Image (spheres, rainbow, N blue to C red):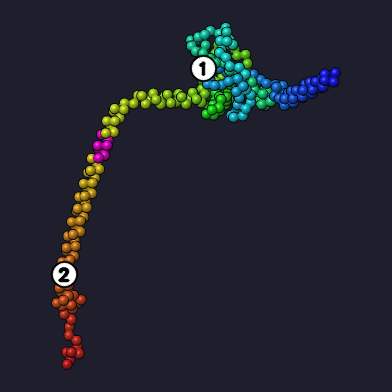
Amino acid sequence: MNSDGKYYRIGMFVIGGLLILLAGVFALGARGWLEPKIRFETYFDETIGNLGLGAPVKFRGVTMGKVTRIDLTPNVYPKLPLTSPDSPNLYRYILVEFEIKKSMITGLLQGDLQELLDDAVERGLRVRVDMAGIVGGNYLEIDQPNPGAATPLLVINWHPRHYYIPSTSSTITQIVNSVDQTLRNLGKVNFDEVQKKLVTLINQLDQNTQQFNNLVQRINHMELAGTVDNLRIITEDFKDVASRLKKDPAQIIWSAQPPPAKSLEKK
């Protein structure tokens, strides 16, 4: 009997500890679980990479909610036609639903949210898939680019069940498209013709360099010859002056013989 009472107390202690643990976890997360949220949806006509359920939804880097569903549009809107004259890729659209905490957009709720969204979309509000890092997962980024930079809206022929924000190409897709366009432009370049022009240009530069070197040599030769002639003339003049100086120094100084001194004439 005492043994049964001991096991009973141990069991009650374990159950009480689990209840306290569950109550603490619920208290810590209850605010997030019970906080009102608003659902949105968007569609992508491209790969979304490793975007998964629970991925963050951010507005200019500020986390506002998370992704709640990823599916194909025909699974959510089964009555829509698979093709359309305006967009033959309707069946390839990827539907992404996400929720945003109501407290994060309290200011927008002061007016009609749908009208505010329509105006923002008109001014370029879009959703795109961004990469968190080299090894990180993808997330949704809501942003409003510069006027005129927003991409055209996808063609849809159904009424979205939730608030709808159009999508735009992801950063990765934009980079890939840019690289692809660059490679296509490079493919149009006639490298054989470019090579020929480069060879011609190099030969022309070599000829011009040779002509320039010849000109410099000629100039140096002319200057050297002129310098030698000038030195020869100066040397001959110096010899003449020295010879005259030896014969008659007074002639060099006064250009004529000085008159005799008066004192000598009286004597």
Amino acid on which disc 1 is placed: Asp
What's drawn in magenta, residue-wise?
Answer: 200-206
Residue 153 appears in the figure: no
Q: Pinpoint residue 36: horizontal percent, then vertical percent.
A: 70, 21
From the viewer's perspective, is 175 left or right of 69? Answer: left
Q: Which residue is mark 2?
A: 239
Q: What residue is at 56 percent from the left and 10 percent from the top?
A: 74
Q: Is residue 190 above or below residue 205?
A: above
Residue most toward the bottom? Answer: 267
Residue 91 appearing in the image: yes
From the image, which quarter does the C terminus lie in?
A: bottom left
The local secondary structure at tag 2 comes to helix
Q: Position of residue 236 (x, y in %)?
A: 15, 66
Task: Identify the mark nearer the N-term, 1 or 2.
Answer: 1
Is 205 magenta? The answer is: yes
**Image quadrant occupied by the N terminus:** top right
* Among the 4 quarters of the image, the one containing residue 68: top right
| Element carrying mark 1 | loop
Amino acid of disc 2: Lys
Mark 1–mark 2 Cα distance, whole angstroms, equals 101 Å
Q: Residues within 10 Å of mark 2 (few under 14, many from 20)?
A: few
Picture quadrant where residue 9 is located: top right
Mark 1 and mark 2 residues within 8 Å of each other at the beta carbon: no
Nearest the camera: 253 or 75? Answer: 75
238 sits to left or right of 116: left
Q: Identify which residue, 205 or 55, lies in the foreground.
A: 55
Main SS of the magenta segment?
Answer: helix
**What residue lies at 31% left-to-right and 27% top-to-bottom?**
191
Q: Which residue is mark 1?
A: 45
Question: Where residue 200 is drawn, which disc sits there?
Answer: none
Q: Residue 7's x, y, as percent?
A: 80, 20
